[in-house]
Image: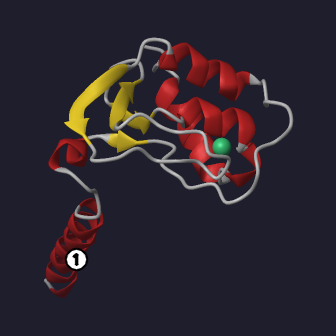
Protein backbone atom coordinates (compact mmCIF):
# COMPACT_ATOMS: atom_id res chain seq x y z
CA UNK A 1 0.00 0.00 0.00
CA UNK A 2 2.60 2.52 1.14
CA UNK A 3 4.81 1.66 -1.79
CA UNK A 4 1.95 2.09 -4.26
CA UNK A 5 0.94 5.59 -3.14
CA UNK A 6 4.60 6.58 -3.10
CA UNK A 7 4.97 5.53 -6.71
CA UNK A 8 1.87 7.53 -7.67
CA UNK A 9 3.31 10.65 -6.09
CA UNK A 10 6.55 10.25 -7.97
CA UNK A 11 4.79 10.01 -11.30
CA UNK A 12 2.87 13.21 -10.51
CA UNK A 13 6.06 14.98 -9.59
CA UNK A 14 7.86 13.95 -12.75
CA UNK A 15 4.91 15.14 -14.86
CA UNK A 16 5.07 18.49 -13.15
CA UNK A 17 8.80 18.78 -13.88
CA UNK A 18 8.28 17.86 -17.52
CA UNK A 19 5.52 20.47 -17.88
CA UNK A 20 7.65 23.23 -16.40
CA UNK A 21 10.47 22.38 -18.82
CA UNK A 22 8.11 22.56 -21.78
CA UNK A 23 6.84 25.98 -20.77
CA UNK A 24 10.35 27.29 -21.43
CA UNK A 25 9.70 27.19 -25.18
CA UNK A 26 9.06 30.60 -26.67
CA UNK A 27 6.03 30.05 -28.87
CA UNK A 28 3.16 27.61 -29.03
CA UNK A 29 4.15 26.15 -32.38
CA UNK A 30 7.36 24.90 -30.84
CA UNK A 31 5.88 23.09 -27.85
CA UNK A 32 5.36 19.84 -29.72
CA UNK A 33 8.66 20.03 -31.56
CA UNK A 34 12.20 19.00 -30.92
CA UNK A 35 14.49 21.97 -31.06
CA UNK A 36 17.98 21.72 -32.40
CA UNK A 37 20.99 24.02 -32.43
CA UNK A 38 19.46 27.08 -30.87
CA UNK A 39 22.60 28.63 -29.49
CA UNK A 40 24.51 31.87 -29.23
CA UNK A 41 28.18 31.38 -30.00
CA UNK A 42 30.51 33.71 -28.15
CA UNK A 43 33.77 33.05 -29.94
CA UNK A 44 34.99 33.91 -33.43
CA UNK A 45 34.29 31.28 -36.10
CA UNK A 46 36.89 28.69 -37.03
CA UNK A 47 39.04 29.58 -40.04
CA UNK A 48 37.96 26.49 -41.92
CA UNK A 49 34.54 24.82 -41.79
CA UNK A 50 34.34 21.44 -40.06
CA UNK A 51 33.38 18.93 -42.74
CA UNK A 52 32.45 15.60 -41.20
CA UNK A 53 29.45 13.29 -40.91
CA UNK A 54 27.56 15.73 -38.69
CA UNK A 55 28.02 18.56 -41.21
CA UNK A 56 26.93 16.19 -44.00
CA UNK A 57 23.83 15.22 -42.03
CA UNK A 58 22.79 18.82 -41.34
CA UNK A 59 23.60 19.85 -44.95
CA UNK A 60 21.43 17.03 -46.28
CA UNK A 61 18.36 17.99 -44.24
CA UNK A 62 18.93 21.74 -44.46
CA UNK A 63 18.67 21.45 -48.26
CA UNK A 64 15.05 20.34 -47.81
CA UNK A 65 14.10 22.64 -44.94
CA UNK A 66 10.65 24.18 -44.65
CA UNK A 67 10.39 27.67 -43.30
CA UNK A 68 8.08 28.16 -40.32
CA UNK A 69 5.13 30.52 -40.76
CA UNK A 70 5.98 32.08 -37.43
CA UNK A 71 8.05 35.22 -37.94
CA UNK A 72 10.19 36.94 -35.40
CA UNK A 73 10.39 40.72 -35.31
CA UNK A 74 14.08 40.68 -36.10
CA UNK A 75 16.91 38.48 -37.17
CA UNK A 76 19.55 36.94 -34.97
CA UNK A 77 23.20 37.71 -35.54
CA UNK A 78 25.92 35.25 -34.78
CA UNK A 79 29.05 36.34 -32.91
CA UNK A 80 30.73 36.57 -36.33
CA UNK A 81 27.93 38.83 -37.67
CA UNK A 82 26.35 36.25 -39.93
CA UNK A 83 22.63 36.96 -39.91
CA UNK A 84 19.77 34.49 -39.58
CA UNK A 85 16.41 34.64 -41.31
CA UNK A 86 13.55 36.00 -39.20
CA UNK A 87 11.86 32.65 -38.77
CA UNK A 88 12.57 29.13 -37.66
CA UNK A 89 12.90 26.22 -40.02
CA UNK A 90 11.71 22.62 -39.93
CA UNK A 91 14.11 19.88 -40.84
CA UNK A 92 14.47 16.14 -40.37
CA UNK A 93 13.07 12.92 -41.80
CA UNK A 94 9.56 13.95 -40.61
CA UNK A 95 9.98 17.73 -40.61
CA UNK A 96 9.31 17.75 -36.87
CA UNK A 97 12.60 19.24 -35.78
CA UNK A 98 12.76 22.97 -35.32
CA UNK A 99 16.01 24.75 -36.01
CA UNK A 100 17.21 28.13 -37.23
CA UNK A 101 18.83 29.24 -40.43
CA UNK A 102 22.25 29.35 -38.78
CA UNK A 103 22.26 25.63 -37.91
CA UNK A 104 24.63 24.72 -40.71
CA UNK A 105 26.84 27.71 -39.97
CA UNK A 106 27.07 26.59 -36.33
CA UNK A 107 28.12 23.02 -37.09
CA UNK A 108 30.66 24.22 -39.64
CA UNK A 109 32.16 27.27 -37.96
CA UNK A 110 31.29 27.09 -34.27
CA UNK A 111 31.66 23.37 -33.69
CA UNK A 112 33.84 23.84 -30.62
CA UNK A 113 31.00 25.68 -28.88
CA UNK A 114 28.31 23.07 -29.49
CA UNK A 115 27.96 20.87 -26.40
CA UNK A 116 28.58 17.17 -26.99
CA UNK A 117 25.03 16.23 -25.95
CA UNK A 118 23.64 18.62 -28.58
CA UNK A 119 25.86 17.01 -31.23
CA UNK A 120 24.57 13.62 -30.08
CA UNK A 121 21.00 14.92 -30.53
CA UNK A 122 21.82 16.13 -34.06
CA UNK A 123 22.91 12.63 -34.98
CA UNK A 124 20.03 10.81 -33.26
CA UNK A 125 17.28 13.16 -34.50
CA UNK A 126 18.55 13.34 -38.07
CA UNK A 127 19.17 9.63 -38.45
CA UNK A 128 15.96 7.93 -39.60
CA UNK A 129 14.96 4.92 -37.53
CA UNK A 130 15.88 1.71 -39.32
CA UNK A 131 12.79 -0.44 -39.19
ZN1 LIG B 1 29.09 32.61 -36.62
* Extreme residue toward the right, this view: 47
Q: Is residue 79 above or below residue 59?
A: below
**54 horizontally vs 92: left or right:** right
Q: How is the image coloured?
A: secondary structure
114 or 46: nearer the eye?
Answer: 46
Residue at 63% in and 33% down: 105
Q: Residues within 10 Å of mark 1 (few under 14, many from 20)?
A: few
Q: For residue 68, which quarter of the picture?
A: top left
Instruction: Please name the residue that numbered disc 1 is placed on.
Output: 13
Could you tell me which secondary element the residue under label 1 belongs to? helix
Q: For residue 35, which quarter of the picture?
A: top left
**48 horizontally vs 67: left or right:** right
Residue 83, image x, y percentages: 52, 39
Q: Is residue 15 above or below residue 49?
A: below
Q: Quadrant of the C terminus?
A: top left
Q: Is residue 42 above or below residue 116?
A: below
Residue at 61% in and 51% down: 117
* Extreme residue toward the bottom, this view: 2
User: How many numbered discs?
Assistant: 1
**71 horizontally vs 95: left or right:** left
Q: Quadrant of the N terminus?
A: bottom left
Residue 125, image x, y percentages: 47, 32
Ligand 1 has an atom within 8 Å of the beta carbon of the residue at disc 1: no
126 or 41: nearer the eye?
Answer: 41
80 or 60: nearer the eye?
Answer: 80
**Quarter of the rendered image showing ligand 1:** top right
Residue 12, image x, y percentages: 16, 73
Residue at 63% in and 54% down: 41
Residue 107, image x, y percentages: 66, 36
Residue at 78% in and 24% down: 51
Amino acid sequence: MGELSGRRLNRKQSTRIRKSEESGYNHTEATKLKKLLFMRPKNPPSAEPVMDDITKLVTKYWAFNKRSKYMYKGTHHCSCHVSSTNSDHFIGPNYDILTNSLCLHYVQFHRDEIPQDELDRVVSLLTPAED
